[in-house]
Image (cartoon, rainbow, N blue to C red):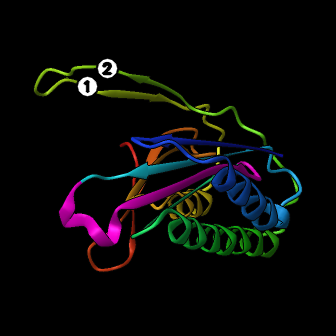
Amino acid sequence: MTVRIHGRNMQVSEKMKEIASDQISHAARIFDNVDTVDVEFTERQNPRLVDERYRVEITSNAAGHIVRIEAEAPDAKSALDTATDKYERQLRRLKERLIQRNRVAVDRSAPSEETFVEEPAPGAIVRTKRFSMKPMTSEEAVLQMEMLGHDFFFFLDGDSNQHCVVYNRKDGNVGLIEPA
């Protein structure tokens, strides 16, 4: 397993990289097929964000599902500890759901390609993401949406072979948008 560690607005020390690599490797032991884990440390200089000065974001691909975790704390070590705990819980939850659904096949989908624009004009598109879409059921799409921590998820329905969207409703339920 490869753990890529980098910092935004800060330099990550070698000791912190070693600690992060050990903790992530320990947390990722739940899945045998986690190849690459991205860990990004961010330091915010805003004095109003004293309790959230450091932010750690962990992103990986496990069993064909993208797992993304964010944690914030006053220091980098605390943020890392919180993030790895959340990451391990999320991996356990994913594995339990996959076992419940008797999913054994592991699909290693290609990572998304991102294109960034340096200085966007007002109202301009600032980021484009491209994903390889495998057909899935709406239940799998809801699981993927929860694993990403997003409010909606765009997917290709395996039954109707049409593009659909699942989303979180204000009443706590999940909605499905299908083309007519």
Q: Is residue 176 visible?
A: no
Determine which residue is flagged by label 1. 125
Measured from the top left, where is residue 72 in percent x and y? 42, 66
Q: For this rendering, which residue is in front, 135 or 64?
A: 64
Determine whether, in the image, residue 78 is placed left or right of residue 140.
Answer: left
Q: Of 91 and 15, which appears nearest the observer?
A: 15
Real-space CA distance between mark 2 and mark 1, rounded to the nearest whole angstrom = 8 Å
Asked where in the image residue 97 lies, by quadrant, the reply is bottom right
Q: Nearer the viewer, mark 2 or mark 1?
A: 2
Inspect the image, locate mark 1, and give the three-letter code of the amino acid beneath it. Ile
Q: Is residue 47 magenta?
A: yes
**Pointers 2 and 1 in contact (C-beta within 8 Å):** yes
Is 90 a magenta residue? Answer: no
* Image side of residue 48 versus residue 39, left or right: left
List the residue tagged with mark 2: 117
Q: Under tag 2, what secondary structure?
A: loop
Give the magenta range: 46-64
Q: Residue at x 39, y 70 (%)?
A: 74
Q: Amino acid at mark 2?
A: Val
Q: Nearer the viewer, residue 55 or 173?
A: 55
Residue drawn where x is 43% and y is 50% of the image: 42
